[in-house]
Amino acid sequence: MFREAFRYATLSVAMVVWILALIAQVYVNVSFGREAVGIMWFAIALQLFLNMGVAYSIRKRDHQTTVAHFASIGVVLGAIGVDKTVFETNGRQRTMAAAWLILTVIDILWVLDFSRNRAIAASSPSLPRSLGSEDGISPIVVDHSGQIVPTLDTPIYRTLPIITEKSTSSSLGRTQPRESDILSTASRLDVKSTSLLTPQTYTLRAEALYGYVRSPDDEQELSFKQGEILWVAQHHGAKWWPAKKSDGATGIVPSNYVRLLA
């Protein structure tokens, strides 16, 4: 919420200052010739395009990395504009310098803000794809009766035919397997935790930081778009959370793709 308010505020200031810079450049061009403005005509056009891009990104919650790239170009061109006119004695040129100084500062803030999501994505761990310590998923806990025991670290599972030493030969219908055979069998299974053992209560609102399309091999996953609001049942330390969409669809979502809302 704060980031959205910040973006609207900076965009409003940027549009007002852009109009001021445009008027100042027109006067400077008329008074001192085209050479006094030079590349800043391209800069003023780029800044308008950047302002429109920021408005679109706020509304659609998309193309944030592209906005950050164009804002970086705006910073360079704005610095050139300030350098061309800041030391002049004419009031119109100083007005132009002041306008570009403000726009440059706003562009710097946009670079820092809109590139933040990219930094999060780069630092986020890869999504869990199989069971084991390599991908950070805790092992499944099994009690003496062979039932899977839910824990805070492993809230989501795929039901597996796991056999324990406490299982009897009569219940299995065959000779009790050795522990080494059980472990080797489990280690060969390519598992991604997707089955919900208990009914979930979706009490937390979350916003999708990125879009996600579920794997065609797993019907339990939930597809969603960037910026979409989901209801989730949070499990601390888990890579996947049970979630529910506004249309009633339920499934699991990667926890590093969403952020909880207050």
Image (cartoon, rainbow, N blue to C red):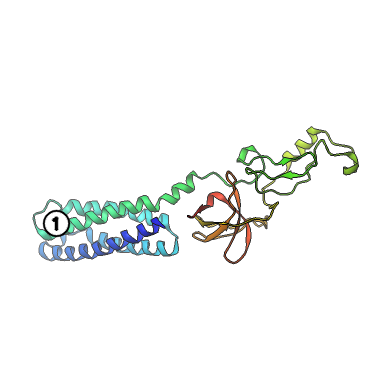
Q: Can residue 83 be seen at all in this image of the molecule? A: yes
Residue at horizontal 48 percent and vertical 48 percent from the top:
121
- Count of numbered badges drawn on the protein: 1
Where does residue 228 sit, x and y in percent of width and height? 51, 61
- Residue at the image point whose x is 56% and y is 50% from the top: 255
Name the quadrant of the N terminus. Answer: bottom left
**In-front residue for pair 256/184:** 256
Residue marked by disc 1: 94
Locate residue 254 relative to residue 69 in the image: left or right. Answer: right
What residue is shown at x 60% (from left), y 45% (from top)? 238
- What x and y, as percent, mark residue 43? 26, 59
Q: Position of residue 100 (x, y in %)?
A: 22, 56
Residue 50 in sight here: no
Residue 78 vertical position relative to residue 191 in the rendered view, above or below:
below
- Please name the amino acid that badge 1 sits on: Arg
Residue 221 shown left or right of residue 225 in the figure? right
Counting other residues with Cα less than 10 Å from the Cα at mark 1, is it few (<14), some (14-19), or many (20 or more)?
A: some
Q: Quadrant of residue 30?
A: bottom left
Residue sitting nearer the eye, 116 or 45: 116
Tag 1 secondary structure: helix
Within the image, what quadrant is residue 66 found in?
bottom left
